[in-house]
Amino acid sequence: MNNIKVVKAEQLKSKPDANSLGFGKYFTDHMLVMDYSADQQWHDLRIVPYGPISLDPSAMVFHYGQEVFEGMKAYKTADGNISLFRPDMNLKRLNASCERISIPQVDPEVLLEGIVQLVNLEREWIPEGEESSLYIRPFIIATEACLGVRAAKEYKLLVILSPVGSYYPEGIHPVSIYVEDQYVRAVRGGTGMAKTSGNYASGIKAQEAAKQDGYSQVLWLDGVEKKYIEEVGSMNVFFKIGGEIITPALTGSILAGITRDSVIALLASWGIPVVERQISVEELFEAARQGVLEEAFGTGTAAVISPIGTMKWENEQISIAGGQTGEWSKKLYDSITGIQKGERDDHLGWRHTI
Ligand code: COI
C-alpha cells in the first residue's frame, strides 16, 4: 500500500546502549496512528513523529478502560533482513480482543502493511544482541469524550516501537514464581482471554507483593475454586511431569499466547505431544514432592521462554530442575529464537520477512 502518509521527525533521538535496554524503556522516532469515527470507520492511517497525544479528559478510555493491545517483535535476521514472527496471529488476536471489549475490528492486512512500513522506517533501531529485538506495541483506545457507560463511537489506534532486551533481568536464567492464593486475575466469561489493560491493572497489587517477597511474578489460579493453574500474567506456563509436557487448557480465562501455540506446534513437529488440560496446584506440588516435576517454564512474546526455577505456594517452596535452566526450556528457547532470527530452518513457515 503506498498511500500511508509519513511525517518524518525533525530530530532523531540517539539510540540507547544495546547492553542496557531492559524492557519498554526506550521508544523510536516514529509511531503509526489511525482513527475511527462512526461515519468514517477506520481512517487516516499515518506515520508521525513519536510523541505525546492530546486527549479530552473525558475520553472514555480513562474512565472505563475500553482498550486492547498486542505485543509482537521484529528481528534482524542472520542474512541481514528484517522479520516479524507470526504477525497474522497477533492481528487475529487483536481483533478477538476488540470483539470482547466492543471495539471496532481492524483490517489485519491494512494494519500489517502499516506496521511493516513503520518497522522499515525504524530499522536502525532494531538491536542485534542475542536476547534483543524491537518490541512492537499496537493498541487501541476509546477516545470519545463522554461519561456514559457504553461502547465509544471514536477510537485511536497507535503502534509504538521499543528496542528491548530480555523481559526479566534473569534473561534465560530461571525466575522465581509465587502462587497467588488471595487475588484472582480472571474468571470464565470475563475478559481473561482478551489482551486488555484491565486484566493487567487488576494483577498489579499481587505482583507488587510478590516482588517485595523477592519473587519475579505471580502464578494465577482459576478465579472460582482457586485450585487450577492459569497463567503468569506476562506468560503462559508449561510443566514437564514424569516425562509428559503439560500446559493449562485454554478455558476462556487464559490468554491464548502465540509463543504458547508455537511451543505446542514445535514440539508436535518433533513428535512430542503436549497435553492441554486443567492442572491443579496441589497436583503440581505433589509431583515436586515425589520428585517427578522435571521442568517448568513460561512462554510469551516479551518473556520468550523463561525457565521457572523456584515456586512458592502457601508455606511450601519447591526448587525445579535444581533451580537450573531445564533441557526443554533451553531447546525451545534456542529453536524459537533461532527461527525468529533466521539462524534455524523455518520449517513451520513462521518468519514474515519484510
Ligand atoms: C507480551 O508478551 O507481549 C506481553 O504483552 C506481556 C506484557 C504485558 C509485557
Image: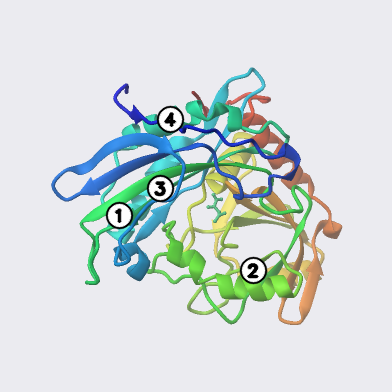
Here the colouring is rainbow
Q: Earlier in the sequence, mark 4 or mark 3?
A: 4
Question: Which amino acid is tagged 2?
Answer: Val
**Which of the marked residues, 2 or 4, is nearer the chain's N terminus?**
4
**What amino acid type should be assigned to the residue bearing mark 1?**
Glu
Q: Which quadrant, please, contains the N terminus?
A: top left
Task: Tell me the residue that label 2 is attached to.
Answer: 218
For ligand 1, tell me if the residue under mark 1 lies within 8 Å.
Answer: no
> Which amino acid lies under the numbered mark 4 shown in the image of this protein?
Lys
How far is mark 4 from mark 1, CA to CA? Answer: 33 Å
| Image mark for residue 93 | 3
Q: Are marks 2 and 4 in contact (CB under 8 Å)?
A: no
- Which structural element holds mark 3? helix
Crowding near the residue tagged with mark 4, few <14, some 14–19, many ≥20 C-alpha atoms within 10 Å: some
Residue at left offset 26%, top offset 37%: 44
Give the residue at mark 4. 8
Determine whether, in the image, residue 125 is placed left or right of residue 34. right
Label annotation for residue 99: 1
First of labels 4, 1 by sequence position: 4
